[in-house]
């Protein structure tokens, strides 16, 4: 059998176990999308057909068995462990340390695995590579003309779409598995809010995480709908959980739905079509920058410093390269003479 037939081509940014909490008696959910223009269309689907894009995390140019590693070797195990943690959470049980880290790891992926995040990463890395090209070109120009052919091919491939895509997926995986992010989420105070008496169900989307700019200030918090009647809430300080619990259930549902729907770029998911008008009016209308979108701003000073250092080093390498290449050629010539003398 061709191994490519077993490739996990459906790459889920919203995993099935997570969406499963919205399933009806037929084990289906409602997927809301905008397939044509600005009109929202609801469709009843199984969870496997709701939150995915084919080959979203695929790394083209690698062997078939490796190009889907992000989905099969990283995200799938993370999702599997988180599913166990979610079952424990919804049953009201106490987390083991392993389950707590599993859920924190899953939350970290939700911050960076969405389609818009992957596209943004690719754009960001392409821009960084573009910024490095002048330095590489100076180095290339310093190479003697008779040695440039191979170097020219490498230079052309450096900023190719395939290379940029590969670096983007590698960067996404590093961000999702970052010990500081996962550890920071695990150290927050956690609670599950029940909204059984609210007028409407909670919705979810490709932007399911409501969060503050960081995790380290006293008012830091993070909210994720984990079912039509359950909200996962994490806060830096327990007093903030108490403050949030003072809001009515209808207020909590409306605030959550406003965010996840207005920030959705691909899909909104729910248990019924009852909120179609709400979704039509808001879907994708007020997109708030994601955590990933804020990273360039947070990292601008460091990035500029690295670029300046790269420019300096590239100029230094270009200046030293011709003499170094001459030394290598002279050394090679001496070895050839010695070899010929010995064999003669």
Image: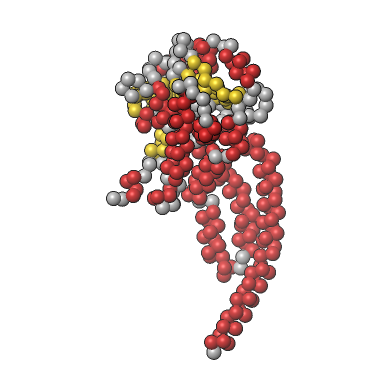
Q: From this viewpoint, is residue 264 visible?
A: no
Q: Quadrant of the C terminus?
A: bottom right
- Total number of numbered labels? 0
For image coordinates 47% across by 32% down, the residue present is 82
Q: Position of residue 331 (x, y in %)?
A: 63, 76
Residue 150 is situated, as x and y percent measured from the top left of the image, at 53, 64
Q: Residue at x 36, y 32 (%)?
A: 48
The residue shown at (67%, 61%) is 318
Image position of 151 with respect to 108: above or below: below
Please report the residue visible at 50 percent of the width from the left and 32 percent of the height from the top. 99
**Residue reaching furthest left?**
1
- Report the coloring of the rendering: secondary structure
Residue 248 vs residue 81, the one in the foreground = 81
**Residue 140 location in percent, x, y?**
60, 61
Would you place residue 120 above or below residue 220 in this image? below
Residue 179 shows in this picture: yes
Q: Residue furthest bottom?
A: 344
Q: Could you tell me residue 272's position as x and y percent?
A: 38, 18
**Of 40 and 261, the residue lying toward us:** 261
Residue 16 shown left or right of residue 163 in the figure? left
Residue in front for this viewpoint, 225 or 156: 225
């Amino acid at each position: 059998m061709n191994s490519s037939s077993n490739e996990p081509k459906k790459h889920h940014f919203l995993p099935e176990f997570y969406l499963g909490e919205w399933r009806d008696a037929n084990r289906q959910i409602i997927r809301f999308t905008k397939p044509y223009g600005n009109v929202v269309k609801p469709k009843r689907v199984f969870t496997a057909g709701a939150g995915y894009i084919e080959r979203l995390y695929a790394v083209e140019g690698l062997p078939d068995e490796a190009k889907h590693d992000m989905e099969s070797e990283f995200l799938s195990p993370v999702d599997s462990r988180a599913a166990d943690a979610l079952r424990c959470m919804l049953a009201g049980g106490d987390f083991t340390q392993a389950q707590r880290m599993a859920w924190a790891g899953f939350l970290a992926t939700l911050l960076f695995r969405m389609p818009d995040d992957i596209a943004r990463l690719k754009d960001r890395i392409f821009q960084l590579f573009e910024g490095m090209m002048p330095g590489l070109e100076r180095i290339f120009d310093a190479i003697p003309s008779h040695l440039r052919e191979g170097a020219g091919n490498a230079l052309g491939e450096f900023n190719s779409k395939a290379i940029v895509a590969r670096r983007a997926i590698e960067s996404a995986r590093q961000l999702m598995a970052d010990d500081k992010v996962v550890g920071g989420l695990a150290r927050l105070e956690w609670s599950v809010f029940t909204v059984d008496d609210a007028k409407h169900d909670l919705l979810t989307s490709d932007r399911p995480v409501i969060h503050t700019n960081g995790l380290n200030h006293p008012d830091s918090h993070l909210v994720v709908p984990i079912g039509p009647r359950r909200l996962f809430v994490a806060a830096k300080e327990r007093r903030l959980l108490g403050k949030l619990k003072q809001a009515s259930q209808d207020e909590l549902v409306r605030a959550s739905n406003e965010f996840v729907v207005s920030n959705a770029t691909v899909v909104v998911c729910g248990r019924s079509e009852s909120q179609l008008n709400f979704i039509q009016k808001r879907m994708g209308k007020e997109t708030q920058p994601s955590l990933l979108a804020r990273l360039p701003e947070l990292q601008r000073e460091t990035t500029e410093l690295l670029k300046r250092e790269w420019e300096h080093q590239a100029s230094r390498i270009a200046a030293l390269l011709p003499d170094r290449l001459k030394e290598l050629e002279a050394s090679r010539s001496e070895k050839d003479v010695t070899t010929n003398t010995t064999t003669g």
